[in-house]
Image (cartoon, grey):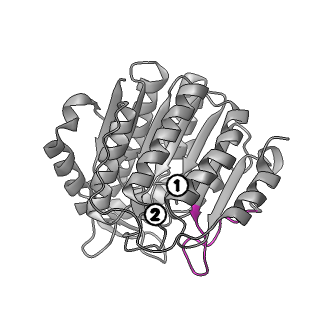
Amino acid sequence: MSTLIVLAPGLAHTKAGHPENHTRMTALMDALQQSGIMADLTIVSPQPATIEQLRRVHAPELIEQVRYVSAMGGGLLDHGDTYATADSFELARLAAGGCCTAVDRIMTGEADNGMALVRPPGHHAEANRVSGFCLFNNIAIAARHAQTAHGAQRVVIFDFDVHHGNGTQDIFYYDDSVLFVSMHMFAPYFYPGIGDLNETGRGSGQGYTLNIPLPPGVGDIGYRRILREAIQPCIADFQPDLILVSIGFDAHWQDPLASAGLSLTGYAHIARDLAQMANEMCDGRLLYILEGGYHLDVLTAGVYNVLQTLLGRDDIQDTLGPSPYPETDITHLLDQLKQRHLPK
């Protein structure tokens, strides 16, 4: 297997005390170097996204907002805690462009698959609004690039960050060329508060948004059952040319910002299933794009495990073990998903 890696760590996009800061990436890059796995990967240098690439998914006003706040030295971009520094505009362009560069290599067959370790993250950025630590929607920009530059007719975006990918949903909600699947925790007062089972797309996009709203405490068994019994048949019916994955390691049971129940082993098993799906459905074309994950040991081991899976190996690092809490049963939710979404 030829596996690429794109590194756009955005180290100057950082804010002291903020959970999404540069230490996530410095810890990750140090761990990957020490593991020796980098020698087995094709390292690809990112190129900044063009303004045209950004405008394929974002309103000019959003792009100008990020540029202006950065040019003024930085500050908050919304009423929450999405921030910019003086360097954030260019670093966000580099993150999005790095994902497009990875798509180029995979769609042309120069690499089988890959992972883009980029920040700022992207899946909460909507067409005309930044949110949830995200400036530009990296995975949406990559999907549009695959369609525009490489003629991909059908792209799957599978998001299993613990938070709903509201930005990605917003961008593709009326679009039948992108199947958006989000498996996320859905609970009172849990960010971003959307991603209900009934949100399935509109217009020509009706039926091309698949939301799996999980209660707290769903872990390895529930996640994998849903992937195999509900998501996989839908993706197979869609017949994608490319599978893009928004991966966040904040669904781990030790992550400080959520209360899901995945283990590192559970993440690795999902990664194996996704690799098999890509091999069977789209000649192995599979790209992971990093989103959240705020427990550094989980983040570093989780990325290592996914890279091993992309390389076709079985090595799994999991010193933290399974969740010590009882797993929430998802049988009723799974029945609802099958009834609503499975091909008739």
Q: Toward the viewer: 33 or 302?
A: 302
Q: Residue at x 69, y 63 (%)?
A: 331
**Residue hosting label 1:** 160
Position of residue 104 in the picture relative to residue 201 (left or right): left
**Amino acid at dot 2:** Ala
Q: Toward the viewer: 175 or 337?
A: 337
Relative image position of residue 67 (x, y in whole percent): 40, 56
Q: Residue at x 58, y 26 (%)?
A: 280
Position of residue 285 in the picture relative to residue 180 (left or right): left
- Neighbourhood count class around disc 2 (C-alpha, 10 Å): few under 14, some 14–19, many 20 upward: many
Asked if residue 125 shows in the view, the reply is: no
Determine which of the numbered discs, if any, sits on residue 34 in the image: none
Main SS category, magenta section? loop
**Residue hosting label 2:** 251
Magenta region, residue range: 184-197
What whole-number distance in Å separates the C-alpha atoms at marks 1 and 2?
8 Å
Quarter of the image with the N terminus in it: top left
Q: Secondary structure at mark 1?
A: loop
**Amino acid at dot 1:** Phe
Circle 1/circle 2 CB separation < 8 Å:
yes
Q: Residue 76 falls in which quadrant of the image?
A: bottom left
Relative image position of residue 307 (x, y in whole percent): 34, 39
Q: Secondary structure at mark 2?
A: helix
Q: Toward the viewer: 55 or 328?
A: 328
Q: Is residue 138 rendered magenta in the image?
A: no
Residue 265 vertical placement versus 4 (above, below): below
Position of residue 25 in the picture relative to residue 306 (left or right): left
Pick whichever of labels 1 and 2 is earlier in the sequence.
1
